[in-house]
Structures are given as C-alpha cells and as structure tokens.
Image (cartoon, grey):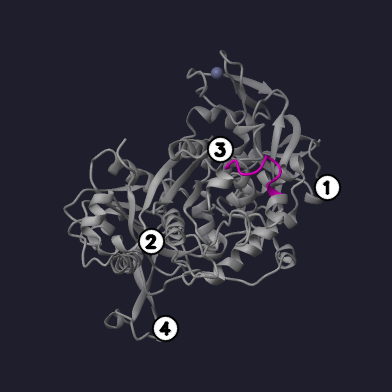
Amino acid sequence: MPAAPVIAAVGCTKIASEHRDCNARDLLADALLDLLADAGMDGLDAVEHGLASYESDHFNMQMTLGAILHDTIGMTPKPGLRIEGGGATGALALRTAWAHIQSGLCDSILVYGVEKNGRGVSSRTANQLFALSADVDWETAIGGTYTGFYAAMMRAHMAQYGTREEHFAHVAARNRGNAAFNPIAQKPMDISIEDVLRSRPVAEPYKLLDCSLLSDGAACILLASEAWAREHVPAFEARPPIFFTGTGCGTDTMRLGDRYPHITNFRAKQQAAQAAYAMADIGDPLREIDVAELYDSYSGVEIQAVEDLGWVARGNGGAAVADGAFDLDGALPVNTSGGLLGRGAPVGATGILQAMEVAQQLWGLADQRRQVAGAKRGLTDTHAGIASISVVNIFERHD
Amino acid sequence: MSDKVSNLIDITERESAADDIWTDFRPIERITLELAQRYHYSLGKQSRFFIELQNRRFFATACGSCGRVCAPPRPLCPACLQPTNWRELTGEGRLETWSTLHFSPGTNADVAALQTPYVLAYVLLDGADTLFPHVLRAEGESLRRGMRVRVAYNEGPVSHPIHLMVFVLA
Ligand SMILES: [Zn+2]
C-alpha cells in the first residue's frame, strides 16, 4: 500500500447555534478562506478533487447541495462527490478521501463539511426531521427519538454494570469546560456535576446538560499525498507532517432491539476500532494514543466509547471517566475541543472538526490550556444513529 | 411550496470587526419557506403485522432455516437471505430497558397526542429473539427491569396503525 495521506491544511468557521448571516454556501466560503490562510495557498487551482460532506437535505430545503458547494468554491469542472452517513458523515467523508488517495485516483482532495441545523426551523420541526433518521416504520411512528434510544441503552448499561448518573455528568461538565479553551466552540460552560444532575430531565436518565447541541458550522481538510503537499502547500514544510494512518468502519442493525442481547454497547464501534488499530499497527491503544475526539452526542456515549475502543474493560468506563482518566490532565485526554457537547455538532462537519482538533493537537498549535504536551498520535471516533455506522480514524505526527 | 418574504432580519447588532471581509454584504434577509408533503406510503411486506393488530393479534416472523423470531417482523431473514414465515405470539413479554421521554417529537397525530412524560419501552416478547419498541403506559418510577408487560389493543381511529397497540403492565 502507498504511504498514508497527509493532512495538508485545515479550516473552519466558528461553531454557533445559528450563523444568521450565512447560508450553507456562505459557511463553506468562510471555512475555505480559513483553510487557504492555514495552507498559505492563494487558491485551489492545484487541488484535484472535491468531496462534500453534509447530512441533511431537509434542513437546507435543498437537494444536491454537494454540487452547489463544489460550484461555490470554484471546484468545477474537477471531479466531486457527496458522502452521507448520518452523524458519521464527516468521518466517513475523510475515510472516503483516504481511499481516493490510497487508490491513486488523485493526489489531493478537499473534504468540506457543512451543516445548518441551528435555528432555520422550529425546534419542533427539527425534532420531526431528526426523527426521520430513525426507522420510520417502527421507531419514528411510535414516538421514539434518538435521545430516547440512547437513554434506553444507557439505562441498560447502568443496570448491567452499575454505571451512575454522576459518571456521565462528569463528561458533560468536563467537555463543556474544555470548550472554554477553544475559540471556535459554541457552548463553553463552567458547570459542576451537580449542575448537570439538577438540569431538567429530557429522556431519563439523560438530562438537558447531558445532551449535545444543534449547530451551524463548516470545516474543511485538504488531504493529499506527502509529495503533493510539499509541492503545493507552502505551510506544509513549517509543521511536522501528520499522516492519516488508520481508518476503520463498522455497522450494526438500525434498531436497538434487533441487537438484543447486546444493548449496552456499540458493536460497530468495536469493529471500527479493531480495523483502524490493525491498519495503524496499534497494539495497546490506551498507551499508544495520546489524544482523541470521541463522539459525545450524549454524555454517557463517551463512557460506552472508552469501553468499545478497547481502552478499559466493559463496564469500567463510568468509573474510569469519573476518575479523571480522560480529563485534560488524565492518561488519555479526550474531547479537548469540547466535543459535541461543548464545541458543537454541525453534523456533516463534525467528523472533520474532530480530525482538525487532532491535527491542531499533533502540530502543537492548540491553545496551551488544552494542548496535550508532546501528542504524537490521535484518534477520532464518530458514529451515526446509535452507531448503525461507526468510523474510527487515526492520525500520526512523524518528526 | 410557497415562498414569500415574511421578515427582514436586522443584523446591525452584529458588530463588524476590523477584519470583517463581508461588510459589503449586509444586511441579511431571511424569508419563510414552507414545504408540506403527503405520502401514499406502502408498509410493504410488513403489512400483515399492522393488519392483524386490528384483529387484536400480534405477529412476528420466524426463519424456517435458522429459527430466529423477529418482532418487529423481517420478511427477509438477514442471516439466511430467505423469506421468513409469520408466527403469532401471545403479546406478553418482559421489560428489558426503557426511557421516560419528557418531550414528544410529534411525528404523527398519535404521537402528538401522547401525554408527556411517556415511557419508550423495549420488550422481549415471549417467543421472540429481538426487543420490540413501543410506548408503555405506566409511570416511569414504577418500572423495573424484567417486569411482565403485555400488548393492549384499541379500536382507533389512529393516524398510524402501530398505535392500534400499546404496552401495559401485565
Ligand atoms: Zn434465518
């Protein structure tokens, strides 16, 4: 297999509950200009391929938005495509871009993710639209919601392993605290575990502060062969190269009930992680990974993730999290960006933002209050639905 | 679809930073668009499940090859890739997990009519190998894993036939 692609440059907008002065194409324009500044490039002439990453046609009231985005940033007539995989969209887009370069189809590909989920529709309409991403015949029709599916999983985890509300409240408080050190974050908060526990119930055992946000935002990453990046990206030489060394994907049944008796954890994530570790030659992930962005759509999901990624034994995630193992000063800091809970979650851009945070960490360019000293290898964990699709990507700095 | 201008959004409160490159593109206008659709939606080969609810009978599917019993039904066994057979269950089972929902997504008229909070329950029906999700009419605080529950039927009218049933404590 050819050498792994590199992250040549990154860019994004601030993540917000609403960018009232931007539609999806405006958000992309701002993220792209940020990327060009990061790259030290004055245009995209040399870039060979585009890849659009967005989840919802409904929220934009626009199908084929991928073609519009490609057009907006002057990528025509170069090849382009759109990737959609629910919450995993951005990570799946990067994985697809990885394959484009590894296959030799191109040496450079711009992955651009955008979502306008903020306030374009009422919260009632937003709930209805998101409910359409569950199984419409059996889950949406009964009044099920993703918050409810996740909550039922967490209740099973609590019953099976003794995981407590305080454990996942730790995640909710810590990630929002980390967001205070990230200038693009949507919702930094200085809150205590008690504050989380006292917030109003949404879908028990999850409370308001256990839930992530609806967001507007865009992010892009220029992925390239190392030789292409050296030739075309002026900023590339100034930073240690970051290689995209591993990618894994797993899937599971759409409905939680069809996974019985495996309803406490994410099998798709276990499979994605094992595939990514094998590709990146990682034998002991807890020791060999220095920083990670985990998919904290709900606070407890981070607890399930540290188990499914093989970092702690099944059932020990809650105690390990509450112990601070994954805090900024812990053994393996996670969600240094603030995660979905604190930085925000513009769906099609989320997986790209996660990789961008890992890149900033590996370059050593994160705000010093959240910078993980000497980070050499990072991981992103992103999934769709209740992990009907799961993607784990791994990035390494080579000095 | 209609598209009419309904409001102008004043963004003057958005301070223009010194490095704002978009000052020539103010103000911003926001309009209201509406999009409503009606679907003549086929329930496909799952249909008998819904039809039998009107007869107060609960059906799953069973695979003749691997024996797996699925509720909700699966016309095609995903393990064996062959058509399954309908199998009637008693409609009784045990509560495996649940969440008490404090907001309703209002996805159809039946859901919109649910009083919040309501319980989203996953039930292992006797004779089934999968959990069936539905509303359990009970107080969330009273619930324990393993409790016996059963299907209760109603005559409707309903907007979606899945609401011809609900779970209740047995
Ligand atoms: Zn079978």
Query: Ligand 1 closer than 8 Å to the CB at disc 2?
Result: no
Q: Which residue is mark 3?
A: A270
* Amino acid beneath label 3: Gln
* Numbered label attached to residue B142: 1
Q: Are marks 2 and 4 on the same chain?
A: no
Which label lies toward us, 3 or 4? Answer: 3
Magenta span contains residue A51: no
Mark 1 closeness class: few <14, some 14–19, many ≥20 residues within 10 Å: few
Instruction: For mark 4, give the secondary structure.
Output: loop
Q: Are marks 3 and 4 on the same chain?
A: no
Q: State how far apart marks 2 and 4 are (Cα).
A: 22 Å
* Horizontal relation, residue A50 to residue A324: left or right: left
Instruction: For mark 1, give the secondary structure.
Output: helix
Q: Which residue is mark 2?
A: A219
Which label lies toward us, 2 or 4? Answer: 2
Q: Are marks 1 and 2 on the same chain?
A: no
Q: Nearer the viewer, residue B27 or A326?
A: A326
Q: Which residue is mark 4?
A: B14
Expressed as whole percent of the image width and height from the top left, the position of residue A268 reads: 53, 37
Expressed as whole percent of the image width and height from the top left, the position of residue A309 reads: 57, 42
* Amino acid beneath label 2: Ala
Instruction: For mark 2, give the secondary structure.
Output: strand
* Amino acid beneath label 4: Arg
